């Protein structure tokens, strides 16, 4: 497939005015930037917390609206204090919000958060209660986000953590916490896991032991799998609200969203967001809307293929002798695949060889129950670009060559995989140019 930019992107370099010279340092930087951009486009990225954006979703990021404010999301005719974004307001109000409401199956969507951590801040501040209230989250040692407990405490709340194994919250521990601490909020923030979070037992325990407690699910890593219907929507499983970043399994910009079916919760989140966030990065918001609209067409097939590819990749690596964590037949139930390569120097060496081959991996040293350096791999991005199960086998072959000190051979396989990715889960640049000129 090709990632060339159509003319509508406006990325061509303009001629310098007659009689002027571009400083040599700027000229070198421009050439270096274009070279790095092409190199990045040709790489295969296996970092589970990242994804590619489609040509359509990229469009707003090079527009004038990148530097414009848009606060008047209710289109109040008497509230146009900032008019820079007025002409494009319909992209947020009439495109982004309706599309995300359909994808999330929720009436109330807040697309103003600018990142996953910012989404967490707004959710905890809006739903965590008065100072001193208890907020329950997943312990970092059990796959929870590293920042949750500290953020809770910085807001004057009391952090209580629970254990999670294979996506299941420890039932006896949760019951004890609900009875003993009467938390205002259970914030489930599972970021490192080979299994989807099992939400219904948590919702049932809250109803039984602490019915005044709210349940919020941070779905950052699996948001694309939820919106694509490959794993259940936490709202259907009893959660009061859901949030997360929009650039992991969901192929959007670096932003965040919050969604709920409860008007009061939506209002609490909006009030917290108003006091914690000013600019919501208008161009990125438009980008999110275009990504969502595109996802309505491609998302279901993409999400199912992510799960198939992750399983195939784990099996292929294990078949080739790698120490893949998880069940032999079902090494993962999410987009993540975990692999033990060796000690830290060996792990870094193989990661470097893969990098030289144009394959980017993620090394983690704190995966739950797994001391030492590990590969935490994700197949979302390569799936989004069109990789299938056969490509996962080739990718495992590339890992063999990298591990054996042959990055050049791995690079050749990477090029073959790239050449075979002909049907991505988005509209290609050629398709956009056809639409532009039709």
Image (cartoon, helix red, strand yellow):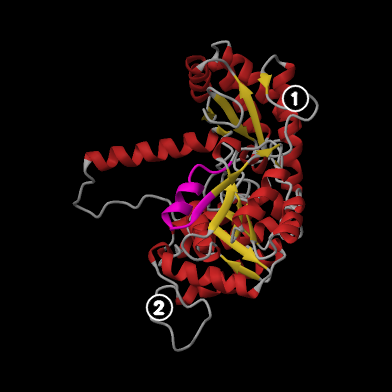
Q: Mark 1 points at which residue?
A: 315
For this orientation, the residue located farthest to the front is 180
Up the image or down, 193 lies above or below 236; here it is above
Q: Is residue 436 visible to the viewer in this orientation of the structure?
A: no
Q: Is residue 333 visible to the viewer in this orientation of the structure?
A: yes
- Nearer to me, 125 or 323: 125
Is residue 152 rendered magenta in the image? yes
User: What residue appears at the point 64 percent right and 75 percent down from the top-left corner?
Assistant: 263
- Nearer to me, 108 or 169: 169
For this orientation, the residue located farthest to the left is 19
Magenta part of the chain? 144-159
| Left or right of residue 225: residue 159 | left
The residues tagged by marks 2 and 1 sit, at their Cα atoms, a distance apart of: 54 Å
Percent x, y for residue 20? 20, 51
Label located before the other in sequence (2 or 1): 2
For this orientation, the residue located farthest to the bottom is 78
Is residue 112 rendered magenta in the image? no
Quadrant (top left/top right/bottom left/bottom right) for the C terminus? bottom right
Percent x, y for residue 241? 64, 62
Up the image or down, 399 lies above or below 212; here it is above
Up the image or down, 145 lies above or below 390; here it is below
Percent x, y for residue 198? 74, 47
Q: Residues within 10 Å of mark 2 (few under 14, many from 20)?
A: some
Q: What element carries label 1?
A: helix
User: What residue appears at the point 78 percent right and 24 percent down from the top-left corner?
Assistant: 328
Identify the mark at residue 423; answer none if there is no mark.
Answer: none
Determine contact: label 2, label 1, CB under 8 Å: no
Q: Mark 2 points at which residue?
A: 83
């Amino acid at each position: 497939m090709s990632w060339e930019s159509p003319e509508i992107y406006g990325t061509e370099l303009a001629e310098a005015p007659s009689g002027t010279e571009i400083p040599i340092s700027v000229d070198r930087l421009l050439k270096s930037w274009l070279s790095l951009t092409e190199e990045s486009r040709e790489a295969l990225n296996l970092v589970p917390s990242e994804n590619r954006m489609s040509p359509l979703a990229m469009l707003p990021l090079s527009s004038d609206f990148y530097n414009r404010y848009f606060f008047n999301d209710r289109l109040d005719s008497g509230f146009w204090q900032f008019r820079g974004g007025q002409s494009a307001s319909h992209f947020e109000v009439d495109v982004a919000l309706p599309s995300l409401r359909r994808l999330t199956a929720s009436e109330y969507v807040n697309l103003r958060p600018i990142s996953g951590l910012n989404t967490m801040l707004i959710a905890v501040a809006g739903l965590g209660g008065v100072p001193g209230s208890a907020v329950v989250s997943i312990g970092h040692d059990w796959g929870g986000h590293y920042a949750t407990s500290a953020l809770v405490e910085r807001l004057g709340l009391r952090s209580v953590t629970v254990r999670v194994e294979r996506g299941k919250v420890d039932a006896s521990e949760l019951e004890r916490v609900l009875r003993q601490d009467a938390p205002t909020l259970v914030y489930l923030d599972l970021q490192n896991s080979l299994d989807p979070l099992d939400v219904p037992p948590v919702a049932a325990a809250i109803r039984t032991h602490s019915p005044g407690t709210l349940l919020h699910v941070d779905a950052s890593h699996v948001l694309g799998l939820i919106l694509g219907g490959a794993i259940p929507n936490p709202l259907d499983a009893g959660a009061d609200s859901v949030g997360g970043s929009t650039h992991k399994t969901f192929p959007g910009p670096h932003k965040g969203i919050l969604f709920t079916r409860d008007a009061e919760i939506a209002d609490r989140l909006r009030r917290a967001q108003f006091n914690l966030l000013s600019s919501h990065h208008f161009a990125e918001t438009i980008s999110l809307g275009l990504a969502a609209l595109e996802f309505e067409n491609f998302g279901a097939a993409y999400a199912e293929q992510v799960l198939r590819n992750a399983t195939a990749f784990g099996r292929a690596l294990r078949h080739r002798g790698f120490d893949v964590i998880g069940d032999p037949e079902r090494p993962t139930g999410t987009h993540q695949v975990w692999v033990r390569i060796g000690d830290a120097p060996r792990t870094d060496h193989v990661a470097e060889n893969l990098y030289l081959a144009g394959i980017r991996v993620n090394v983690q040293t704190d995966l739950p129950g797994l001391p030492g350096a590990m590969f935490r791999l994700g197949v979302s991005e390569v799936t989004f670009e069109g990789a299938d199960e056969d490509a996962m086998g080739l990718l495992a072959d590339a890992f063999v060559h990298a591990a054996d000190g042959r990055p050049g051979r791995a690079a050749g396989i990477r090029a073959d995989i790239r050449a075979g990715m002909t049907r991505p889960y988005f509209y290609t640049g050629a398709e956009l140019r056809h639409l532009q000129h039709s």
